[in-house]
Amino acid sequence: MSKYTIAWMPGDGVGNDVMRATRIVLDKLGLDAEYVHADIGWEFWIKEGNPLPERTIEILKKTDCALFGAITSKPREEAAEELDPALRDKGLTYFSPIVRLRQLFNLHTNLRPCEAFKGNPLNRLGDDIDLVVFRENTEGMYGGIEWFPLPEKIATAMADPEVGLPDRMQRWFDKGLENVALSTRVVSRQGCESICRQSFEYAKKFGRKSVTLVEKPNVLRETGGLMTRVFREVAKDYPGVEAWEANIDAICMWMLKNPQDYDVLVAENMFGDIVSDLCAGLVGGLGFAPAANIGDEYAVFEPTHGSAPKYDGKDVVNPIAMLLTAKMMLDWLGEADMADRLHSAISAVIEAGEVRTYDMAQVRAGSAGAASTTEMAKAVAARL
Protein backbone atom coordinates (compact mmCIF):
# COMPACT_ATOMS: atom_id res chain seq x y z
CA MET A 1 0.00 0.00 0.00
CA SER A 2 1.32 3.45 -0.95
CA LYS A 3 2.33 5.92 1.73
CA TYR A 4 0.22 8.69 0.16
CA THR A 5 -2.93 8.85 -1.92
CA ILE A 6 -3.04 11.94 -4.10
CA ALA A 7 -5.99 13.16 -6.15
CA TRP A 8 -4.71 13.80 -9.66
CA MET A 9 -6.66 16.58 -11.40
CA PRO A 10 -5.17 17.76 -14.71
CA GLY A 11 -8.19 19.94 -15.45
CA ASP A 12 -8.25 21.90 -18.70
CA GLY A 13 -5.89 22.94 -21.47
CA VAL A 14 -2.21 22.91 -20.61
CA GLY A 15 -3.05 21.54 -17.19
CA ASN A 16 -2.75 18.14 -18.84
CA ASP A 17 0.67 18.97 -20.31
CA VAL A 18 2.23 20.27 -17.11
CA MET A 19 0.79 17.45 -15.01
CA ARG A 20 2.31 14.85 -17.33
CA ALA A 21 5.63 16.64 -16.98
CA THR A 22 5.32 16.69 -13.21
CA ARG A 23 4.68 12.97 -13.07
CA ILE A 24 8.05 12.41 -14.76
CA VAL A 25 9.76 14.26 -11.93
CA LEU A 26 7.74 12.77 -9.08
CA ASP A 27 8.43 9.26 -10.37
CA LYS A 28 12.15 10.01 -10.59
CA LEU A 29 12.06 11.32 -7.00
CA GLY A 30 10.52 8.03 -5.95
CA LEU A 31 7.55 9.49 -4.09
CA ASP A 32 5.61 6.55 -2.64
CA ALA A 33 2.16 7.61 -3.81
CA GLU A 34 -0.94 6.35 -5.54
CA TYR A 35 -2.35 8.94 -7.95
CA VAL A 36 -6.13 8.79 -8.30
CA HIS A 37 -7.52 10.56 -11.36
CA ALA A 38 -10.38 12.95 -10.60
CA ASP A 39 -12.59 14.72 -13.14
CA ILE A 40 -12.75 18.52 -13.04
CA GLY A 41 -13.08 21.32 -15.54
CA TRP A 42 -14.78 22.70 -18.61
CA GLU A 43 -15.33 19.34 -20.30
CA PHE A 44 -17.57 18.24 -17.43
CA TRP A 45 -19.48 21.51 -17.41
CA ILE A 46 -20.30 21.03 -21.10
CA LYS A 47 -21.21 17.33 -20.84
CA GLU A 48 -22.73 17.17 -17.36
CA GLY A 49 -23.52 20.72 -16.31
CA ASN A 50 -21.12 20.41 -13.39
CA PRO A 51 -17.40 21.31 -13.63
CA LEU A 52 -16.84 19.69 -10.22
CA PRO A 53 -18.75 16.39 -10.25
CA GLU A 54 -19.79 14.91 -6.93
CA ARG A 55 -17.66 11.82 -7.66
CA THR A 56 -14.60 14.07 -7.63
CA ILE A 57 -15.54 15.52 -4.24
CA GLU A 58 -15.84 11.98 -2.88
CA ILE A 59 -12.39 11.11 -4.25
CA LEU A 60 -10.87 14.14 -2.55
CA LYS A 61 -12.42 13.12 0.76
CA LYS A 62 -10.51 9.83 0.57
CA THR A 63 -7.10 11.24 -0.39
CA ASP A 64 -4.30 13.00 1.48
CA CYS A 65 -4.19 16.02 -0.83
CA ALA A 66 -4.76 17.00 -4.46
CA LEU A 67 -2.54 18.15 -7.30
CA PHE A 68 -4.36 20.31 -9.83
CA GLY A 69 -3.27 21.52 -13.27
CA ALA A 70 -5.39 24.38 -14.61
CA ILE A 71 -8.98 25.43 -15.11
CA THR A 72 -10.94 27.23 -17.82
CA SER A 73 -13.59 29.66 -16.63
CA LYS A 74 -15.86 31.86 -18.72
CA PRO A 75 -18.62 34.41 -18.02
CA ARG A 76 -22.11 33.06 -17.35
CA GLU A 77 -23.51 33.79 -20.83
CA GLU A 78 -20.60 32.12 -22.64
CA ALA A 79 -20.73 29.15 -20.32
CA ALA A 80 -24.45 28.71 -20.98
CA GLU A 81 -23.88 28.81 -24.76
CA GLU A 82 -21.35 25.97 -24.61
CA LEU A 83 -23.47 23.74 -22.41
CA ASP A 84 -24.81 20.56 -24.05
CA PRO A 85 -28.16 21.49 -25.66
CA ALA A 86 -29.90 18.76 -23.68
CA LEU A 87 -28.94 20.55 -20.44
CA ARG A 88 -29.70 24.15 -21.34
CA ASP A 89 -33.24 24.22 -19.93
CA LYS A 90 -32.25 22.71 -16.57
CA GLY A 91 -31.52 26.02 -14.83
CA LEU A 92 -27.81 25.25 -14.50
CA THR A 93 -25.36 28.07 -13.74
CA TYR A 94 -21.61 27.81 -14.14
CA PHE A 95 -19.47 28.21 -11.03
CA SER A 96 -15.73 28.15 -10.54
CA PRO A 97 -14.78 24.65 -9.37
CA ILE A 98 -11.63 25.84 -7.66
CA VAL A 99 -13.59 28.44 -5.67
CA ARG A 100 -16.06 25.76 -4.66
CA LEU A 101 -13.22 23.44 -3.62
CA ARG A 102 -11.74 26.17 -1.44
CA GLN A 103 -15.04 26.69 0.31
CA LEU A 104 -16.08 23.03 0.57
CA PHE A 105 -12.81 21.99 2.19
CA ASN A 106 -12.25 25.32 3.98
CA LEU A 107 -8.93 25.86 2.21
CA HIS A 108 -8.59 29.21 3.91
CA THR A 109 -5.00 29.99 2.99
CA ASN A 110 -3.62 30.56 -0.48
CA LEU A 111 0.17 30.56 -0.30
CA ARG A 112 2.06 31.93 -3.30
CA PRO A 113 5.88 32.16 -3.19
CA CYS A 114 7.60 34.12 -5.97
CA GLU A 115 11.34 33.53 -6.21
CA ALA A 116 13.77 34.91 -8.78
CA PHE A 117 16.01 32.02 -9.82
CA LYS A 118 19.60 32.83 -10.70
CA GLY A 119 20.20 32.60 -14.43
CA ASN A 120 16.61 33.19 -15.48
CA PRO A 121 16.81 35.61 -18.44
CA LEU A 122 13.36 36.93 -17.52
CA ASN A 123 14.58 38.35 -14.20
CA ARG A 124 14.86 41.91 -15.43
CA LEU A 125 14.80 43.39 -11.92
CA GLY A 126 17.46 41.17 -10.38
CA ASP A 127 18.05 37.68 -9.00
CA ASP A 128 17.47 38.70 -5.37
CA ILE A 129 13.68 38.95 -5.35
CA ASP A 130 12.09 36.49 -2.94
CA LEU A 131 8.46 37.24 -2.06
CA VAL A 132 5.71 35.24 -0.40
CA VAL A 133 2.03 36.18 -0.68
CA PHE A 134 -0.57 35.04 1.87
CA ARG A 135 -4.01 35.40 0.30
CA GLU A 136 -7.22 34.80 2.26
CA ASN A 137 -8.92 32.13 0.19
CA THR A 138 -12.60 31.79 1.09
CA GLU A 139 -13.98 35.28 1.70
CA GLY A 140 -13.67 38.75 0.19
CA MET A 141 -14.63 39.63 -3.38
CA TYR A 142 -14.33 36.00 -4.47
CA GLY A 143 -16.87 34.76 -1.96
CA GLY A 144 -19.32 34.00 -4.77
CA ILE A 145 -22.23 36.10 -3.44
CA GLU A 146 -23.49 37.85 -6.59
CA TRP A 147 -26.71 38.76 -8.40
CA PHE A 148 -27.72 39.80 -11.90
CA PRO A 149 -30.20 41.23 -12.35
CA LEU A 150 -30.34 42.71 -8.86
CA PRO A 151 -33.36 41.19 -7.04
CA GLU A 152 -35.81 43.80 -5.82
CA LYS A 153 -35.89 42.34 -2.31
CA ILE A 154 -32.10 42.72 -2.03
CA ALA A 155 -32.18 46.29 -3.31
CA THR A 156 -35.13 47.16 -1.06
CA ALA A 157 -33.39 45.71 1.98
CA MET A 158 -30.28 47.74 1.22
CA ALA A 159 -32.42 50.88 0.85
CA ASP A 160 -34.03 50.39 4.25
CA PRO A 161 -33.39 53.50 6.38
CA GLU A 162 -32.23 51.26 9.23
CA VAL A 163 -29.41 50.04 6.98
CA GLY A 164 -28.53 53.64 6.23
CA LEU A 165 -28.21 53.42 2.44
CA PRO A 166 -31.48 54.78 0.99
CA ASP A 167 -29.85 57.76 -0.73
CA ARG A 168 -27.12 55.60 -2.25
CA MET A 169 -29.53 52.97 -3.52
CA GLN A 170 -31.99 55.26 -5.27
CA ARG A 171 -29.85 55.72 -8.37
CA TRP A 172 -29.80 51.96 -8.95
CA PHE A 173 -33.59 51.90 -8.86
CA ASP A 174 -33.54 54.79 -11.35
CA LYS A 175 -31.35 52.77 -13.73
CA GLY A 176 -33.69 49.80 -13.50
CA LEU A 177 -32.74 46.80 -11.36
CA GLU A 178 -32.78 44.61 -14.47
CA ASN A 179 -29.69 46.55 -15.59
CA VAL A 180 -27.78 46.23 -12.33
CA ALA A 181 -25.31 43.54 -11.20
CA LEU A 182 -24.06 43.24 -7.62
CA SER A 183 -20.96 41.46 -6.30
CA THR A 184 -20.26 41.55 -2.59
CA ARG A 185 -17.08 41.78 -0.55
CA VAL A 186 -17.69 39.99 2.72
CA VAL A 187 -14.93 39.44 5.29
CA SER A 188 -14.98 38.19 8.85
CA ARG A 189 -12.76 39.01 11.80
CA GLN A 190 -11.91 35.30 12.00
CA GLY A 191 -10.83 35.15 8.37
CA CYS A 192 -8.76 38.31 8.68
CA GLU A 193 -7.05 37.15 11.85
CA SER A 194 -6.28 33.70 10.46
CA ILE A 195 -4.52 34.92 7.33
CA CYS A 196 -2.69 37.74 9.13
CA ARG A 197 -1.45 35.46 11.88
CA GLN A 198 -0.25 32.85 9.41
CA SER A 199 1.74 35.47 7.53
CA PHE A 200 3.47 36.63 10.71
CA GLU A 201 4.10 33.06 11.86
CA TYR A 202 5.73 32.32 8.50
CA ALA A 203 7.89 35.44 8.75
CA LYS A 204 8.96 34.51 12.26
CA LYS A 205 9.72 30.89 11.36
CA PHE A 206 11.79 31.68 8.28
CA GLY A 207 13.51 34.84 9.47
CA ARG A 208 11.63 37.21 7.17
CA LYS A 209 12.04 40.87 8.07
CA SER A 210 8.59 42.27 7.30
CA VAL A 211 4.93 41.57 6.61
CA THR A 212 3.05 44.07 4.43
CA LEU A 213 -0.72 44.33 4.46
CA VAL A 214 -2.13 45.05 0.99
CA GLU A 215 -5.54 46.73 1.31
CA LYS A 216 -7.63 49.79 0.41
CA PRO A 217 -9.18 50.99 3.71
CA ASN A 218 -9.40 54.62 2.60
CA VAL A 219 -12.18 53.63 0.17
CA LEU A 220 -13.37 50.22 1.38
CA ARG A 221 -13.79 51.60 4.85
CA GLU A 222 -15.66 48.75 6.50
CA THR A 223 -14.08 45.63 4.99
CA GLY A 224 -10.66 47.21 4.49
CA GLY A 225 -10.95 48.87 7.85
CA LEU A 226 -11.63 45.58 9.61
CA MET A 227 -8.69 43.87 7.89
CA THR A 228 -6.40 46.76 8.82
CA ARG A 229 -7.45 46.82 12.46
CA VAL A 230 -6.99 43.08 12.81
CA PHE A 231 -3.59 43.24 11.08
CA ARG A 232 -2.40 45.85 13.57
CA GLU A 233 -3.67 43.81 16.51
CA VAL A 234 -1.92 40.64 15.31
CA ALA A 235 1.31 42.53 14.58
CA LYS A 236 1.65 43.36 18.28
CA ASP A 237 2.31 39.67 18.99
CA TYR A 238 5.35 39.66 16.67
CA PRO A 239 7.67 42.48 17.78
CA GLY A 240 10.56 40.98 15.81
CA VAL A 241 8.77 41.38 12.47
CA GLU A 242 8.16 44.79 10.93
CA ALA A 243 4.51 45.46 10.05
CA TRP A 244 3.94 47.60 6.96
CA GLU A 245 0.74 48.71 5.23
CA ALA A 246 0.15 49.64 1.59
CA ASN A 247 -2.83 50.37 -0.63
CA ILE A 248 -3.29 47.91 -3.48
CA ASP A 249 -2.83 50.56 -6.18
CA ALA A 250 0.25 52.12 -4.58
CA ILE A 251 2.06 48.85 -3.97
CA CYS A 252 1.73 47.93 -7.64
CA MET A 253 3.95 50.95 -8.35
CA TRP A 254 6.31 50.54 -5.42
CA MET A 255 6.99 46.87 -6.11
CA LEU A 256 7.92 47.63 -9.70
CA LYS A 257 10.33 50.29 -8.45
CA ASN A 258 11.77 48.50 -5.41
CA PRO A 259 10.71 44.83 -5.23
CA GLN A 260 13.64 43.96 -2.99
CA ASP A 261 12.14 46.11 -0.22
CA TYR A 262 9.32 43.60 0.33
CA ASP A 263 9.25 40.20 1.92
CA VAL A 264 5.91 38.69 3.03
CA LEU A 265 2.64 40.17 1.76
CA VAL A 266 -0.84 39.47 3.14
CA ALA A 267 -4.16 40.37 1.54
CA GLU A 268 -7.82 39.49 1.15
CA ASN A 269 -8.91 37.27 -1.72
CA MET A 270 -9.02 39.57 -4.75
CA PHE A 271 -6.16 41.85 -3.75
CA GLY A 272 -4.05 38.78 -3.02
CA ASP A 273 -4.81 37.46 -6.48
CA ILE A 274 -3.80 40.75 -8.08
CA VAL A 275 -0.60 41.33 -6.15
CA SER A 276 0.58 37.72 -6.51
CA ASP A 277 0.38 37.97 -10.31
CA LEU A 278 2.40 41.17 -10.08
CA CYS A 279 4.96 39.30 -7.98
CA ALA A 280 5.05 36.54 -10.59
CA GLY A 281 5.81 39.14 -13.25
CA LEU A 282 8.78 40.34 -11.20
CA VAL A 283 10.38 36.88 -11.26
CA GLY A 284 9.78 35.84 -14.84
CA GLY A 285 6.04 35.39 -15.27
CA LEU A 286 3.34 32.87 -14.41
CA GLY A 287 5.56 30.05 -15.65
CA PHE A 288 7.44 30.39 -12.35
CA ALA A 289 4.51 30.95 -9.98
CA PRO A 290 3.33 28.02 -7.82
CA ALA A 291 0.50 28.08 -5.29
CA ALA A 292 -1.11 26.06 -2.55
CA ASN A 293 -4.66 26.10 -1.18
CA ILE A 294 -4.26 24.99 2.42
CA GLY A 295 -6.82 24.13 5.06
CA ASP A 296 -6.61 22.61 8.52
CA GLU A 297 -6.86 19.04 7.21
CA TYR A 298 -6.58 19.12 3.43
CA ALA A 299 -4.73 20.97 0.67
CA VAL A 300 -5.03 21.44 -3.08
CA PHE A 301 -1.88 22.44 -4.94
CA GLU A 302 -2.10 24.33 -8.24
CA PRO A 303 0.09 26.67 -10.29
CA THR A 304 -1.28 30.18 -10.71
CA HIS A 305 -1.31 30.14 -14.52
CA GLY A 306 -4.46 29.44 -16.49
CA SER A 307 -5.35 26.74 -18.99
CA ALA A 308 -4.01 28.54 -22.11
CA PRO A 309 -6.28 26.58 -24.50
CA LYS A 310 -4.33 27.59 -27.62
CA TYR A 311 -1.34 25.60 -26.33
CA ASP A 312 -3.33 22.54 -25.19
CA GLY A 313 -1.57 19.34 -26.18
CA LYS A 314 1.31 21.11 -27.94
CA ASP A 315 3.85 20.32 -25.21
CA VAL A 316 5.35 23.82 -25.32
CA VAL A 317 4.52 25.61 -22.06
CA ASN A 318 6.86 26.10 -19.13
CA PRO A 319 6.24 23.43 -16.43
CA ILE A 320 8.39 25.10 -13.76
CA ALA A 321 5.38 26.59 -11.94
CA MET A 322 3.79 23.14 -11.77
CA LEU A 323 7.04 21.55 -10.59
CA LEU A 324 7.40 24.19 -7.88
CA THR A 325 3.80 23.50 -6.92
CA ALA A 326 4.72 19.83 -6.50
CA LYS A 327 7.60 20.97 -4.32
CA MET A 328 5.09 22.79 -2.09
CA MET A 329 3.03 19.60 -1.91
CA LEU A 330 6.09 17.64 -0.81
CA ASP A 331 6.79 20.18 1.92
CA TRP A 332 3.18 19.94 3.13
CA LEU A 333 3.37 16.13 3.19
CA GLY A 334 6.50 16.35 5.34
CA GLU A 335 8.85 15.13 2.60
CA ALA A 336 11.35 17.91 3.21
CA ASP A 337 14.31 16.09 1.67
CA MET A 338 12.47 15.41 -1.58
CA ALA A 339 11.23 18.98 -1.65
CA ASP A 340 14.76 20.34 -1.22
CA ARG A 341 16.13 18.02 -3.91
CA LEU A 342 13.44 19.13 -6.34
CA HIS A 343 14.04 22.81 -5.63
CA SER A 344 17.79 22.34 -6.09
CA ALA A 345 17.27 20.52 -9.39
CA ILE A 346 14.98 23.25 -10.73
CA SER A 347 17.48 25.92 -9.66
CA ALA A 348 20.35 24.07 -11.33
CA VAL A 349 18.53 23.67 -14.64
CA ILE A 350 17.54 27.33 -14.76
CA GLU A 351 21.01 28.55 -13.83
CA ALA A 352 22.71 26.29 -16.39
CA GLY A 353 20.56 27.76 -19.13
CA GLU A 354 20.98 24.77 -21.43
CA VAL A 355 17.27 23.91 -21.47
CA ARG A 356 14.77 26.73 -21.88
CA THR A 357 11.11 26.69 -22.81
CA TYR A 358 9.91 29.27 -25.33
CA ASP A 359 9.21 31.96 -22.71
CA MET A 360 12.71 31.66 -21.28
CA ALA A 361 14.27 31.52 -24.74
CA GLN A 362 12.14 34.57 -25.63
CA VAL A 363 10.93 33.10 -28.91
CA ARG A 364 7.54 32.04 -30.26
CA ALA A 365 6.05 28.87 -28.83
CA GLY A 366 7.14 25.86 -30.85
CA SER A 367 10.16 27.64 -32.34
CA ALA A 368 13.39 25.78 -32.95
CA GLY A 369 15.74 26.08 -30.02
CA ALA A 370 13.00 26.14 -27.41
CA ALA A 371 12.66 23.12 -25.15
CA SER A 372 9.32 21.36 -24.87
CA THR A 373 7.38 20.91 -21.66
CA THR A 374 8.53 17.31 -21.49
CA GLU A 375 12.16 18.16 -22.22
CA MET A 376 12.22 20.65 -19.37
CA ALA A 377 10.75 18.05 -17.00
CA LYS A 378 13.32 15.47 -18.09
CA ALA A 379 16.13 17.98 -17.57
CA VAL A 380 14.96 18.59 -14.00
CA ALA A 381 14.57 14.85 -13.40
CA ALA A 382 18.12 14.28 -14.64
CA ARG A 383 19.43 16.77 -12.07
CA LEU A 384 17.85 14.79 -9.24
Image: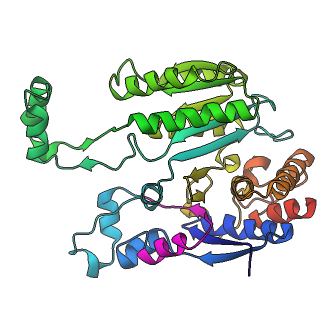
Q: Is residue 98 left or right of residue 62?
A: left
Q: Is residue 332 left or right of residue 227?
A: right
What residue sits 68% from the left and 20% below the top?
Answer: 258
Question: Residue 270: x, y in percent?
Answer: 45, 39
> Is 65 part of what is drawn in magenta?
yes
Q: Which residues are magenta?
A: 54-73
Residue at 85% over, 69% down: 28
Is residue 129 left or right of 243 when viewed as pictured?
Answer: right
Along the viewing direction, whichever of 239 and 271 lies nearer the viewer: 239
Residue 62 in the magenta stretch? The answer is: yes
Can residue 304 be seen here? no
**Colour scheme used in the picture?**
rainbow
Point out residue 338 in the picture as x, y percentages from the top left corner.
83, 58
Residue depicted at x 85% and y 59%:
380
For image coordinates 8% across by 32% down, the residue present is 160
Q: Position of residue 16 (x, y in %)?
A: 63, 69
